[in-house]
Amino acid sequence: MKFKSAKIVNFSHPLTSEQIKEVEEKESIKIEEVINIPVQFDIESDFLPQFEKMIKNVENLESEFFKVVYVNPPSLGTISFMLGVEIKKYFYNPKILRWKQDRGGIFPVWKLAEVIEIK
């Protein structure tokens, strides 16, 4: 099935009209909407609740499930994003270990901040 239009869910810097046009030309599709989702996490707090709150702020995201949606992850997160998608193909309910720096000592020490379950 060939779609004629799509949306971009953008977790990165705002896209320019030129960038949107590049996607349209490369994919031969019309981008009907860019949904910009600001991403700013408090590294001292658990990530999963912050992520869930961020996603809930996007109206009608669930209704896009069967439509063409391009996801633009934060620039430095692209590899992690791809890894997360791929890892679900190989493991049943993997869990992510998140570490944070303990700033109490002279040398950096990383301690477990949380375990995030992917459902």
Image (cartoon, grey):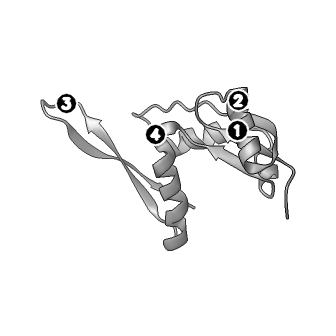
Label 4, label 3: how far apart the Cα atoms are: 27 Å
Q: What residue type is labelled 3?
A: Gly
Q: In this view, does 48 lie to the left or right of 65?
A: left
Label 4 to label 2: alpha-carbon separation: 21 Å
> Looking at the rendered structure, which numbered label has been put on residue 18?
2
Element type at mark 1: helix
**Residue situated in front as seen by the camera: 36 or 43:** 36
Residue of label 1? 22
Q: Position of residue 10 (x, y in %)?
A: 65, 37
Look at the numbered discs 4 and 2 and tell me whether their residues touch, using CB distance below 8 Å: no
Q: Spatial distance from mark 3 to mark 1, Cα to Cα?
A: 47 Å
Mark 1 closeness class: few <14, some 14–19, many ≥20 residues within 10 Å: few
Q: Give how far across and how far down residue 61 sits, in percent.
A: 76, 46
Residue under pointer 3: 104
User: From where the camera sits, is residue 117 visible?
Assistant: no
Q: Are there few (<14), some (14-19), or many (20+) residues within 10 Å of tag 4?
A: few
Residue type at the position of mark 2: Glu
